Each structure stands twice: as structure tokens, then as C-alpha cells.
Amino acid sequence: MVPDIGRGSRTHGLLVYLYGPGRREEHTDAHLVGSWDGFAPDPGRDTDPHVTLARLTAALDLRVKQVGDRAPAKHVWHCSVRTAPGDRRLADEEWNAVAQRIVHATGIAPDGDPDGCRWIAVRHAEDHIHIVATLVRGDLRNPRLNYDFNKAQAVCRRIEEEMGLRRLNAGDGTAAKNPTSAEKFKAERTGRPETSRETLREAVRQAVAGADDEKEFFTRLREAGLRVKVRHAPSGDALGYNVALPGDRNRHGEPVWYPGSKLAPDLSLPKIRLRLADGTAERAAAAAAAGRADWSPPARERRSATGIAERAAVLLDGDDDEAAAQLVGVGELLDAVAQTSPVATRAELAAAARAFERATRSHIRAERADTRALRAAARGIVQAGGALGRGEDGGTTAMLVSTLVLVTLAAARWHSARGHAQQAHAARQAAEHLRTAYHQAAATPMRVLHDQGRALPEAQRRAHEATLRAALPKQGVQADGTPTKTDALVATLAQAEQAGHDPETLLQQAIDMRELDTAADVNDVLVWRLRRLAQLPAHPGEAPRRPQAGTRPTKTPANRTSERNASTAAPRPAVSDPRSRPPRR
């Protein structure tokens, strides 16, 4: 059950709309289901609705007229209340009870208060009502409406439980402001797919992703085609900023400006400055960790970002409030990937970034916030530009997105453990979009790897399959009972061995990086971890390279074969024995 509250100044105009046909003839059988005294005139049940509408307007505005100039400028309080899709149809009597509880909870008309504001509840559809009240009490004072939206939300959660309706996630006041009805209607009228507020919010998020300083942030806004107006103090320091879409004007022909704080709580200039203060000092180290200089800049940056995202997932898996800072960094990384992604995955990645935006905000503040690595990764991806969607660029996109799925699921668990229902739901939504994007990006490289795995000599294939069974004894069967396809993983182990790595050591290192329980396909996750650790090409059609100096100890294929032969004579500890594993990183 979703309440939506607004203020206005024209009682009669609102009633004409509620009792009218609607913008698409969607209003049917408009009638009262409740009022302040139970005897308000109902234009929907009268033979002369125009006269009755005037009488109802006069009754609601009576006290507003009595106080004259002391009446609030916006004296009309309007709250629509809608049930969730799939909920049962409520009777008029039930909607009356809902309306009475809302006006009581918000302070419009408390129970037992004879001087409460005058209000009515109008129903013109099966799934919602409109509550209209005038904000002057019987004693000619204004009602106290502090936190009326939060109070309406809270009582709706209780009503859902008592009436057996679908229970929605409780909010915590950190969500971005929703577009108003007027903004939605304007978007429809002008043929825009979304409101100006939503378009601007996404554009500002993308501009701040990986920005090095305030100047670069404002430059990105202008390069994105937005109108920008910066507010300055007498000293010349910037106090805030407003943005507007070109061509978006009000009835007076003036641009419709939105302050950053009205787009989202964390997009005000002071909040953005705090984020920029974290800097991108780790940029050089992140680039150096990406490996091969012959890979394209987008491929190198995505490889670097994958390792950084893995570390963020480990921090989110810990029970530490300091991980809250990682959420903001992950949000920037998603924004950077979305705006530079190949065409095939761009829509899903943009949807993932938009969904995760809600998961970046809560009341928990990290005292030692450090998002330098994530911000450096986001900046590197933005500066490297878009990936081509094929070859090494496309493969590293799949590599990064595979890791981001696990990161967003770790964020969902982190929020769930703290009771942040809306944020946890948003993180899970982002993970679903990322899964779809992953399948789009990984289709070609994984198909090539499967073919390569099936083409291996039988003896080599069986040896690597034995390595997998020893290290992953519980991963032989999928959730639907069918055998797990390990062709791609076998091919990757074979290529790692060819490049000079010990497959067993490398596989255990990939397994020990962090848990695999949330992976939809453990084999896919391990394929990309192994290819990154061994610096194998993300696109399997490219030639592998020998490991660089400074990588983890490896063994040559010849030594590996000798150890296999020796294993038949002397038993060795099972891979699952903790004493035989490398230290957990």
C-alpha cells in the first residue's frame, strides 16, 4: 500500500479532476467512501453533480475562508493511497477505515478531536483512493503535519499486515524524491520516456562517477548537454548547483531548475565534495595491476576493476559498518561501466546502476571511509572510453560483470543484516540485471571455451576433471539435477598450465578468494577468476602469455606430470584439508 502526499491551493480544481473522467477516461464511478463527519455531499451520487461539487468545495473550504489571509498559501492536502498489484479488491468500508487511520496518524484529523481538519476520501478506481483535506482546523489553527509522509508510510505498513495485503518494504527517509504527478504528466505530454528529474539524476550520477575534482564534475555535466547554474558565495566559493534539461521550461518560458539535493540526498554539492575528497590516488597502482600492456585500455581497466570489486565484496561480507563506504564506490563503478559498456549490454547495465543507486544510501556513515580504489577504477573505465563488445574488450566486460553480480549480492546481505529492506531489495534487483548483462557479454567467449574444452585430448581432459572433483566435490550437479558443464573450466585450467601455472594451486587460489555460495554458476565465476589470476586473455581466441615475474609460485608442465606419476605411489593430503591450502587472502 503506497501513500503519495502533495500540497496545492485549488480545492475546486482538484475535486473536478477526481470526479472527472481522468486524462484517459480511466476514472469510473467516482464517489465518496469517507468524510470528516460522514455526511459530506457526494457529487458522484447526486443527480446534479455540478451543484453538489460546488457545495462540497464550499464545505471543505469553510474554515479556510474564515481565517482569510492567515490561511496557508497551499491549504489543500492531497494523499493518494494505492494497493499493490495482485492485492485483493477492498470494499468501500475498508477504504473508509484506511482513510480514517491515515488522517489520524498524520495529524489531519486525530480521533476524538472535534476540531480536526475537514477531509474526504474519493474512490474512482478499484485499487486506490484520494484523500483531500483543507489545512485549517476547527479552532482556526493550522494542523501540525511534521513528517506526515513518514507517518503515512508507517500506518500503511500496519494496515497491510492487518488486512492481509502485500507487505512493502519500509523506508528510512534516504530514498531519492519521486517525481510529482505534474512531472509525470509533463513527460507524457512531451513524449519523454521519463521525467526530467529522473533524467537529471542519472546524468549527475554519471558525471560524478570517478571525477577527480569539482571542476571536472561540472565540466562533465556541461559535456553531457545539461544546463548548469552554480551558486556562489560573496567570497567566490561555490555553495551549490542547479541543473536543467535543454528545452525543459515552465509556463513562463523559464528553464526548470533542479538543485542537486532535490535529485537525491547524496547529490548535493557538500555530499559530492565529501566523495571527491576521497580522491583517486590509487589510480597508478590500479593500472599497473591490470597486467598486459598490449591489451586495449578498456580491457586493462576492466581487468583492474575486477580485482578491486572482489576486494569490495570481501569487505561487504564482513560484519563492519565501515563497509558502507564501499557501497558508494560500487555505485560509481556501476555508473562508469554502464556509460561505457558495449551496446549489447548497455541497457541492462544501466538498469543495474539505476537500481543499485538506492542501495548506496542509508543512515550508516563510515567514519573511516576509503573508496579510493573503487573511485580510481571508475575513473579509469570512464577515461578509457567504451568497449567494442568483441574480442578482449568484450571478454573483460563479462569478467567484470560476473564479479559485480557477487558484489551486489554481498551488498544485499549487508543491508539485510541491518534491516535495510528497500536497499537490500534494490541490490538484489541490480544483481538480476547484471546476470542478464553477463549472459549477453559472456555468450561468445564461453561458447569458444566450451568448444576448446571438448577438443582437448582425453587424457588431459580427465586429469583436469579430476583436479576439479578434488577441489569442488559438491559442485558436480546443478540445481536442476543435471551434471555441471565443466568444459570451459577445463579449457581454462589447460591454458593456465600451458602458460606455466600449476592448475591445482591456481584453482585453490581462485576458490579461496571468497565464498562461492551465492554464485548462480560456480564454474563461470571460477573461469573468470582463473583467467584474471593467470593473466590469460578474457577472449579465449587470443594467445596466452607466460606469467610475469612476481606472480604466485608456479610449476612447469613437466614437474606437474612428474607429480601426477608420483601420486600413485605416495598419498598426499586432500585439497579440502585446510593445511594444504594457501593462506586465505
Image (cartoon, grey):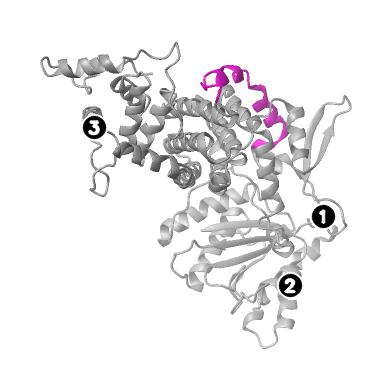
Residue 3 placement: quadrant? bottom right
Q: What stretch of residues is rendered in magenta?
A: 266-294
Which residue is rendered at x = 54% and y = 57% of the image? 2
Per the model, the C-alpha gap separating discs 3 and 1 is: 65 Å
Residue for point 48% across, 25% down: 307
Residue 139 visible, this orientation: no
Q: Are marks 1 and 2 in contact (CB under 8 Å)?
A: no
**Image-based side of 489 in relation to 395, left or right:** left
Residue with the most extreme bottom position: 47
Distance between mark 1 and mark 2 Cα atoms: 32 Å
Residue tagged 1 = 249
Say whether disc 2 or disc 3 marks the residue closer to the N-terminus.
2
Q: Is residue 251 above or below residue 441?
A: below
Judge the density around disc 2: few (<14), some (14-19), many (≥20) Cα neighbours within 10 Å: some
Q: Is residue 257 above or below residue 269?
A: below
Q: Amino acid at mark 2?
A: Thr
Q: Whole-percent x and y of residue 522?
A: 33, 36
> Toward which corner of the image does residue 296 lie, by quadrant?
top right
> Which residue matches tag 3?
465
Q: What x and y, as percent, mark residue 142?
A: 72, 54
Please say if 243 is above or below 143: above
Q: Earlier in the sequence, mark 3 or mark 1?
A: 1
Q: Between 304 and 561, which is closer to the camera in this rendering?
A: 561
Question: Is label 3 in a helix, a strand or a loop?
Answer: helix
Observer-nearest of 520 and 248: 520
* Residue 57: numbered disc: 2
Residue 546 painted magenta: no
